[in-house]
Image (spheres, rainbow, N blue to C red):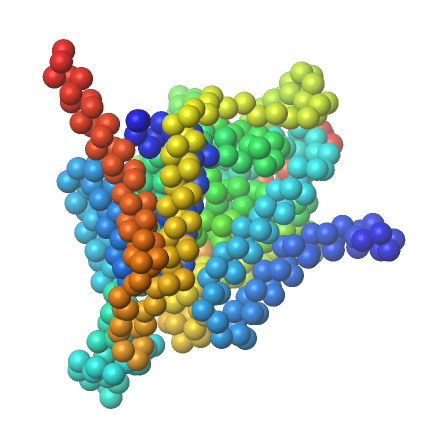
Amino acid sequence: MIFIRNENLRRLLRVAIPYLAVPGLVLLGALVFDEKRHLIVSFGVAVLALLLFAAGFDRKQIGARRLVIVSVMTALSIVGRLIPVFKPIAALTILTAMYLGSESGFLVGAMSALLSNFYFGQGPWTPFQMLAWGLIGLVAGYLAGPLKRSKVFLLIYGLLSGVFFSFVMDIWTVLWYNGTFSPALWVSAVAAAVPHTIMYSVSNILFLWFLAKPIGEKLERVRVKYGV
Amino acid sequence: MRSLEDYHPRAVGLYFLAVTGIAVFSMNPVIVAESLFGSLFLYLVRHGLRDGKTHLATLGLFLVLTLVNHVVSHNGVTPLFVVNNNPVTLEALLFGAFTAAMITGTIYWFRSFSEIMTSDKLLCLFGALSPKLALVFSMALRYVPHFRRQSERVNASQRAMGLYKEDNILDAAKGGGRVFSILLTWALENGIITADSMAARGYGLGRRTSYTIFRRRPRDLVFLALSVILAALTVAGSFRLSHSYYPVFRVDVPDAWGSAGLFAYGLLTLLPSILEIKEAIRWRWYLSKI
């Protein structure tokens, strides 16, 4: 890391390696290799990625204001998950990431998954939900500029993140059921989960459509007024 | 002895990690059966015969998961009947049933886990890892009821001002949106005040520590040691176990080490139930002396 002079690139790498490369590699490994231990590997890597994030987060100097705002957004998305049928977690995660940066986005997504599961039931799926929603926030943070400029792009991102979340959770379902990845089972899991996928995507689009402007203005105001 | 809830979070956390970890990653039929029995028994001991609906829903899940396997797997040598030119085999049925048992067992473990490992205990576990995340964790959890109360207040004052009526869906939705908007502005401002107050009291100056009310007692150590030893025995014994689902369903008779592992896992799964039963008996015994 010492040899990379560009600070932004260094920062990107420090984030990209643990959160993107490792899970990506494992998913690739699950698709390519034929082994019976995919479940252990994927579970271990999901937990490891979250732990790495936690360790990195703690060493940083983060102001109390940002910390509190992240908690506020997390609490809002937990309350929002109590809404029947439509779930605003991903939408709120994306909005937070757009205005407060990718790290805050990852945190809101992951923490909302962990904490709302106290109401909805913890399980071995918790780390995967944390990682999936966290990644949606992380990427939204990197795309903050274009997402703020174009509403169409924002809605498309919402649609895609709903599909992404559903597909990742389907991979987990197959791994849990079968111990190893099976394309045929995955296709049937994806097919069985179509109503959920539609529900995720529709609620993302719906909430982003209605909330993007008011919440964006409020977060922007807090950011400008208090320098979060 | 006390019931499982009264033990130190670290001991309880490690126990659940061991018992569910082994259940999820081992597909040995005996271990799967032990896990399902132990978790169901613990749930029944804690709840009695109520919650019939929950059990029925889980049974439904069990049946669906058992049958899903036939979609993809036609391995095995014992065909039962043929659907669409694809044989439904005994082996695939058994594999589906044991996978379903593994998953339902884990679901029951996590039901007990959610009840026993409440958020304060989880906070105690992870607070040591990252005090900052622990702070976000506890603040967010604290805000949930806080926001709910505040939104009721906003709602009441909106209604008092006659700003929306309930008989019209569109109007009610507009009103709900307004309440949410007010709540969000208030929450962010309130958060800034909280943060400034934290900064004024010296947040961020020193290393953050986290406080827990849980104390380590000798019994926690005994429970911890017992779980670790039983789990280690199970893992050691599991290398001597062999079984197969395809092409023929077969469970080999284990040698001494293997049997010890299976016995250890059985004991591990029954440990919390034993504690609960013991506590219940003791309670009744004390009551009878009054």
Rendering coords of residue A135 (x, y %): 59, 54
In front of the other: A77 or A27: A27
Residue at x-position 40% and y-position 76%: A184
The answer to whether residue B122 is left or right of residue A108 is left
What is the residue that sits farthest to the front in this orientation?
B256
Up-down relation of residue B77 to residue B94 (above or below): below
- Residue A69 lies in quadrant: top right
In front of the other: B4 or B176: B4
Q: Would residue A224 be seen by someone viewing this image from the given angle? A: no
Screen quadrant of the N terminus of chain B: top left
Rendering coords of residue A143 (x, y %): 68, 55
Q: Would residue A49 be seen by someone viewing this image from the given angle? A: yes
What is the residue that sits farthest to the left in this orientation?
B288
Rendering coords of residue A151 (x, y %): 62, 55
What is the residue that sits farthest to the bottom in this orientation?
B85
Up-down relation of residue B193 to residue A63 (above or below): above
Residue at x-position 58% and y-position 51%: A48
Residue at x-position 42% and y-position 43%: B228
Screen quadrant of the C terminus of chain B: top left
Up-down relation of residue A228 to residue A182 (above or below): above
Residue at x-position 13% and y-position 13%: B289
